[in-house]
Image (cartoon, rainbow, N blue to C red):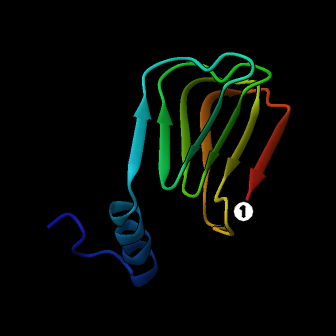
Amino acid sequence: DLLAGMDAQTLAEQKRLLSTPTLMLKRSLRSGKVIKHDGHLVIVGDVHAGSEVVATGDIIVWGEIRGIVQAGAGGNQLAEIRAMRIEALQIHIA
Protein backbone atom coordinates (compact mmCIF):
# COMPACT_ATOMS: atom_id res chain seq x y z
CA ASP A 1 0.00 0.00 0.00
CA LEU A 2 1.50 3.34 -1.08
CA LEU A 3 -0.04 5.26 1.84
CA ALA A 4 1.17 2.93 4.61
CA GLY A 5 3.57 4.47 7.11
CA MET A 6 2.69 8.12 6.44
CA ASP A 7 1.95 10.52 9.28
CA ALA A 8 -1.66 11.73 9.64
CA GLN A 9 -1.12 15.10 7.92
CA THR A 10 0.70 13.59 4.94
CA LEU A 11 -1.92 10.85 4.66
CA ALA A 12 -4.77 13.40 4.67
CA GLU A 13 -3.01 15.46 1.97
CA GLN A 14 -2.42 12.38 -0.22
CA LYS A 15 -6.06 11.32 0.09
CA ARG A 16 -7.17 14.87 -0.86
CA LEU A 17 -4.91 14.82 -3.92
CA LEU A 18 -6.15 11.40 -5.03
CA SER A 19 -9.82 12.32 -4.67
CA THR A 20 -9.65 15.59 -6.67
CA PRO A 21 -10.27 15.43 -10.45
CA THR A 22 -7.30 16.38 -12.63
CA LEU A 23 -7.39 17.91 -16.12
CA MET A 24 -4.31 17.60 -18.32
CA LEU A 25 -3.84 19.94 -21.30
CA LYS A 26 -1.10 19.23 -23.84
CA ARG A 27 -0.78 22.67 -25.42
CA SER A 28 0.41 26.19 -24.74
CA LEU A 29 -2.12 28.88 -23.85
CA ARG A 30 -1.94 31.99 -26.03
CA SER A 31 -2.95 35.52 -25.09
CA GLY A 32 -6.70 35.86 -24.53
CA LYS A 33 -7.24 32.20 -23.62
CA VAL A 34 -8.91 31.47 -20.24
CA ILE A 35 -8.97 28.00 -18.68
CA LYS A 36 -11.04 27.28 -15.54
CA HIS A 37 -11.22 23.86 -13.89
CA ASP A 38 -12.81 22.46 -10.74
CA GLY A 39 -9.87 20.35 -9.57
CA HIS A 40 -6.16 20.06 -10.31
CA LEU A 41 -4.76 21.29 -13.63
CA VAL A 42 -1.64 20.09 -15.45
CA ILE A 43 -0.49 22.00 -18.53
CA VAL A 44 2.22 20.58 -20.77
CA GLY A 45 3.20 23.79 -22.52
CA ASP A 46 3.51 27.48 -21.71
CA VAL A 47 1.03 29.92 -20.19
CA HIS A 48 1.71 33.05 -22.24
CA ALA A 49 1.20 36.65 -21.11
CA GLY A 50 -2.44 37.64 -21.57
CA SER A 51 -3.78 34.18 -20.77
CA GLU A 52 -5.41 33.14 -17.50
CA VAL A 53 -5.56 29.82 -15.65
CA VAL A 54 -7.87 29.20 -12.67
CA ALA A 55 -8.24 25.92 -10.75
CA THR A 56 -9.74 24.96 -7.40
CA GLY A 57 -6.80 22.59 -6.83
CA ASP A 58 -3.10 22.65 -7.71
CA ILE A 59 -1.69 23.96 -11.00
CA ILE A 60 1.38 22.35 -12.55
CA VAL A 61 2.87 23.79 -15.74
CA TRP A 62 5.49 21.80 -17.61
CA GLY A 63 6.74 25.00 -19.20
CA GLU A 64 6.77 28.73 -18.48
CA ILE A 65 4.14 30.83 -16.73
CA ARG A 66 3.89 34.43 -17.96
CA GLY A 67 0.14 34.99 -17.63
CA ILE A 68 -2.23 35.08 -14.65
CA VAL A 69 -2.50 31.91 -12.54
CA GLN A 70 -4.85 31.19 -9.61
CA ALA A 71 -4.72 27.91 -7.71
CA GLY A 72 -7.07 27.07 -4.86
CA ALA A 73 -9.89 29.20 -6.27
CA GLY A 74 -12.73 29.07 -3.80
CA GLY A 75 -10.53 29.19 -0.72
CA ASN A 76 -8.15 26.20 -0.85
CA GLN A 77 -5.10 27.68 0.93
CA LEU A 78 -3.15 24.42 0.57
CA ALA A 79 -3.12 24.64 -3.24
CA GLU A 80 0.23 24.93 -5.02
CA ILE A 81 1.52 26.39 -8.27
CA ARG A 82 4.56 24.73 -9.82
CA ALA A 83 6.27 25.37 -13.14
CA MET A 84 9.57 25.00 -14.93
CA ARG A 85 9.85 28.81 -14.92
CA ILE A 86 7.62 31.48 -13.40
CA GLU A 87 7.60 35.03 -14.71
CA ALA A 88 3.90 35.54 -14.11
CA LEU A 89 2.03 38.82 -14.16
CA GLN A 90 -0.03 37.61 -11.19
CA ILE A 91 -0.09 34.50 -9.00
CA HIS A 92 -2.93 33.84 -6.56
CA ILE A 93 -3.49 31.11 -3.98
CA ALA A 94 -7.01 30.77 -2.52
Please name the residue that numbered disc 1 is placed on: 94
Q: Residue at x 67, y 59 (%)?
A: 73
Quadrant assignment for the C terminus: bottom right
Q: Please identify the quarter of the rendering in which residue 76 is found.
A: bottom right
In the image, 39: left or right of 59?
left
| Location of residue 80 with respect to 14 vertically, above or below | above
User: Residue shown at 40%/83% (left/top)?
Assistant: 8
Q: Where residue 13 sits in the image (x, y, percent)?
A: 44, 70
Residue 34 at x, y percent in the picture: 66, 32
Q: In which quarter of the image is residue 78?
A: bottom right
Indicate the position of residue 57 as horizontal and vertical percent values. Answer: 54, 56
Q: Quadrant of the N terminus?
A: bottom left
Farthest right residue? 89
* Of 32 and 72, the residue lying toward us: 32
Q: Which amino acid does label 1 sit on?
A: Ala
In depth, the one of 51 and 13 nearer the eye is 51
